[in-house]
Amino acid sequence: MARPIITLTTDYGTSEHLVGTIKGAILHVNPDATIVDITHDVAPFDVLDGALAIASAYRFFPPHSIHVVIVDPGVGTERRPLLVRAASQYFIAPDNGVLSIIYEQNDDAVVRTLTAEHYFLHPISQTFHGRDVFAPVAGWLSKTWQPASMGDEITDFKRFALPKPKTENGLLKGVILKVDHFGNLMTNLTPADLPNGMLKSAAVQMTVNDREVKRLVANFAQGEPNEPVAIIGSSGYIEIAVNKNNAARVLGANRGAAVTLAIS
């Protein structure tokens, strides 16, 4: 049997001991696990950023991969730890909406609350459930493959809906969801939101923070110096980019900024 894969998506950063410690807690339970870092640079406490990160990555992992997602500003409170089965994979995370896009993309998700505390590391720190709850549960799941023994199914888990584009007076109105490492602006617009002919034409009429974006290009290199262009990003959303530059700085835009696209 192939070695089990356990991925990590956190807001811990890498300057402290936290990431190394949770890896140790996993390997203490199952030394045969393969641990993959998706990212530890989720914006601190930012559940939406964490949700976008795991949603962009999980589909590219083999079946039975275990994804530990720790963006947990409510650590130590009454919020529940979860184990979710969806898309033939497993997700371990706090019940704070960080798996909302997973739920949206998988109507048949099975959600359990983790109550079998003999799988936890004791004593349990009220500030580090990543080490004492999520990591050991991932390790034990990768050995036993018995999610039903870890807790009961629930239906009242927390979830949020991503903001949806709205059509008004010939304009498609959206919003910036994320600014990535390169300064590209991920919008909540997808190719499915565009009129059929627009994807075949290089010309668009977009506005971001009162700045115009006039071209939809196939790749970053097609943009002229300092020219903001629209591009279909690898996560499936339309992004605003500037070739070899930072679109967020060039446009003076950040998450939450309004985006409009003329569609008539």
Image (cartoon, helix red, strand yellow):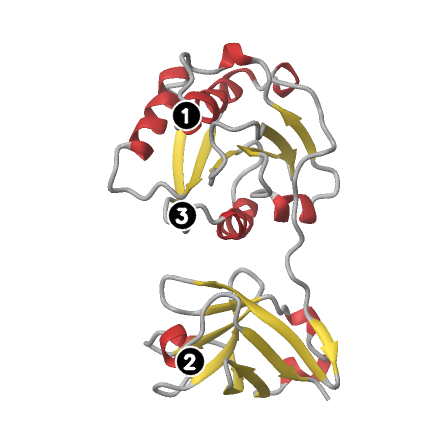
* Kind of residue at badge 3: Pro
Residue 44, numbered circle: 3
* Kind of residue at badge 2: Leu
Q: Position of residue 61 (x, y in %)?
A: 52, 42
**Residue for badge 2:** 251
Residue farthest to the top, as pictured: 118
Q: Residue at x 44, y 74 (%)?
A: 253
Q: Position of residue 231 (x, y in %)?
A: 51, 75
Residue farthest to the front, as pictured: 77
* Kind of residue at badge 1: Ala
Where's the C terminus, which quadrant?
bottom right
Q: CA distance from mark 1 to mark 3?
A: 27 Å
Residue farthest to the left, as pictured: 15
Q: CA distance from mark 3 to mark 2?
A: 24 Å
Q: Residues within 10 Å of mark 3 (few under 14, many from 20)?
A: some
Q: Residues within 10 Å of mark 1 (few under 14, many from 20)?
A: many
Q: CA distance from mark 2 to mark 1?
A: 44 Å
Q: Residue at x 54, y 44 (%)?
A: 58
Residue 33, numbered circle: 1
Residue 262 shows in the view: yes
Pointer 1 with pointer 3, Cβ within 8 A: no
Q: Is residue 76 above or below residue 251?
A: above
Q: Position of residue 31 (x, y in %)?
A: 36, 19
Look at discs 2 and 1 and give the one toward the viewer.
2
Look at discs 1 and 3 and give the one toward the viewer.
3
Q: Residue at x 52, y 28 (%)?
A: 77
From the viewer's side, name the closer residue of 131 and 91.
131
- Please tell me whether mark 3 sits on a helix, a strand or a loop: loop
- Please tell me whether mark 2 sits on a helix, a strand or a loop: helix
Q: Residues within 10 Å of mark 2 (few under 14, many from 20)?
A: many
- Seen in the image, is 4 located left or right of residue 167? left
Q: Residue at x 41, y 18 (%)?
A: 30
